[in-house]
C-alpha cells in the first residue's frame, strides 16, 4: 500500500508559523489572540476538538524512494511540524500523536536508536518554538523503563509548557493502550487493597479517571495514514465513539491539506454515540 506521491522540498520549514498567539509578539490590543485561521474554523461544520493520529508509512515512503528507513522517519518529523501548525491554525484543541508504541521495541536496535534520537532532537530543537506558540505538551505512555535522559526531556517539555492554553499536543511515547488500561486497573486495585475503595464502586468513569491523561476529551476522530486500517493498540479505551478516518498517503506526505481532507471526512459522518441523534462534532 505504498504511496509514492512526490516529496516536497521544505526541509527547512520552521516548526510553527508566526501567529498572533506567539508570546514573542503578543499585544493585548490585538483583536484575535488565538492564532486560529478563523476562515477555516468558521465553516458550517464543527471542528473536532480532539484529533488523534497514527503516523504510519514512514518506512514505505522511504522504501519507495530507495532511501533508508530513517529518512522516512526524518521526513515524518517534518510532516509532524506541518501538522502541528495546521492543527493550531484550524483551532483544534487537542492533537494526540502516536510517536512510539510499546510494541516498537521489537524493531531492530538501529531503528530504535534512530527513533529515540529523533525524539531527543525534536524536543531539543522544537520545544522553545512550541512554547512560544502557546502549545502545551503532554506525554502519555510508560516512562519508568525509558532512559533517564529521555525521561528528563519529556518532563522538561511538560514542565515548560504547563501553563500554555493553546493547542495541547499529546505525545504518545512508549505507549500501548492495553498497558495504559492495565496501569489504571492496577491503581484501582491498590486503592481497593488499601481499603480506600469498594470494588463495587469501580465504574467505566472511575477507570477512565485513572488513565494517563484523564482530563482530556476523548478523540473525536482518529486518523491513520498509509492506508492501513487498524488501531494497533492506540487509545483503545478513549476511541469507543471516535470516528476512524484512514488516509491513503504515507505519513511523510501528510500536510495541512491532508489534515483538512480527513477532517472533512469526519464532518460528513453521523455520530450517534449509541443513541439516535445524528450529529457530528457534538
Ligand atoms: C510508522 O512508520 C511510524 C513510526 C513507528 C514512528 C513515528 C515517528 C515519527 C513520525 C517521527 C518521530 C516522532 C517524534 C515525535 C520524534 P513505520 O516505520 O511503521 O512505516 P512502515 O509501516 O511503512 O514500515
Image: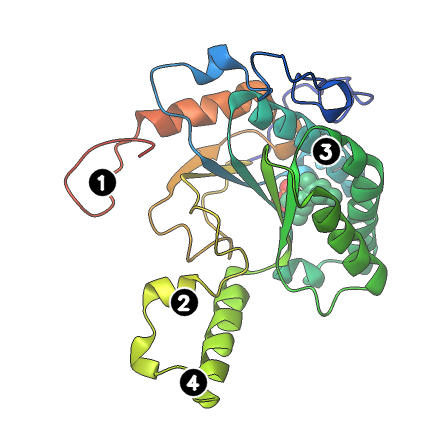
Q: Earlier in the sequence, mark 3 or mark 1?
A: 3
According to the picture, the residue beneath numbered tag 2 turns out to be 207
The residue sitting at 53% across, 71% down in the picture is: 183
Q: Note whether ligand 1 is within 8 Å of mark 1.
A: no
According to the picture, the residue beneath numbered tag 3 turns out to be 130
Give the x, y percent position of residue 103. 62, 61
Query: Helix, strand, or loop for circle 1?
Result: loop
According to the picture, the residue beneath numbered tag 4 turns out to be 192
Q: Earlier in the sequence, mark 2 or mark 4?
A: 4
Q: CA distance from mark 2 to mark 3?
A: 32 Å
Q: CA distance from mark 1 to mark 4?
A: 35 Å
Position of residue 77 in the picture relative to residue 221 (left or right) = right
Answer whether labels 2 and 4 touch (C-beta < 8 Å).
no
Residue 272 is marked as: 1
Query: Helix, strand, or loop for circle 4?
Result: helix
Q: Nearer the viewer, mark 3 or mark 1?
A: 3
Q: Nearer the viewer, mark 1 or mark 4?
A: 4
Position of residue 99 in the picture relative to residue 209 (left or right) = right
Amino acid at each position: 500500500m505504498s504511496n509514492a506521491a512526490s516529496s516536497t522540498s521544505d526541509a527547512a520549514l520552521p516548526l510553527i508559523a508566526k501567529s498572533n498567539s506567539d508570546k514573542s509578539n503578543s499585544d493585548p490590543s490585538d483583536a484575535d489572540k488565538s492564532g486560529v485561521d478563523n476562515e477555516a474554523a468558521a465553516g458550517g461544520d464543527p471542528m473536532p476538538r480532539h484529533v488523534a493520529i497514527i503516523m504510519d508509512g514512514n518506512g514505505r515512503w522511504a522504501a519507495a524512494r530507495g532511501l533508508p528507513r530513517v529518512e522516512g522517519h526524518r521526513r515524518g518529523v517534518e510532516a509532524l511540524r506541518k501538522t502541528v501548525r495546521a492543527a493550531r491554525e484550524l483551532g483544534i484543541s487537542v492533537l494526540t500523536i502516536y510517536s512510539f508504541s510499546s510494541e516498537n521495541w521489537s524493531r531492530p536496535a538501529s531503528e530504535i536508536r534512530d527513533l529515540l534520537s529523533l525524539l531527543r532532537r525534536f524536543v531539543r530543537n522544537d520545544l522553545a518554538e512550541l512554547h512560544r506558540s502557546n502549545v502545551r505538551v503532554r506525554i502519555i505512555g510508560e516512562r519508568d523503563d525509558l532512559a533517564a535522559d529521555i525521561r528528563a526531556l519529556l518532563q522538561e517539555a511538560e514542565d515548560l509548557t504547563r501553563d500554555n492554553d493553546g493547542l495541547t499536543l499529546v505525545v504518545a511515547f512508549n505507549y500501548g493502550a492495553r498497558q495504559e488500561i492495565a496501569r489504571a486497573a492496577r491503581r484501582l486495585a491498590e486503592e481497593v487493597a488499601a481499603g480506600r475503595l469498594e470494588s463495587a464502586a469501580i465504574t467505566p468513569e472511575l477507570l477512565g479517571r485513572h488513565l494517563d491523561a484523564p482530563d482530556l476529551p476523548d478523540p473525536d476522530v482518529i486518523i491513520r495514514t498509509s492506508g492501513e486500517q487498524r488501531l494497533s493498540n492506540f487509545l483503545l479505551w478513549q476511541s469507543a465513539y471516535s470516528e476512524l478516518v484512514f488516509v491513503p498517503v504515507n505519513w511523510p506526505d501528510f500536510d495541512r491539506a491532508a489534515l483538512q481532507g480527513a477532517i472533512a471526512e469526519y464532518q460528513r459522518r453521523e455520530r450517534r454515540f449509541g443513541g439516535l441523534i445524528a450529529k457530528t462534532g457534538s
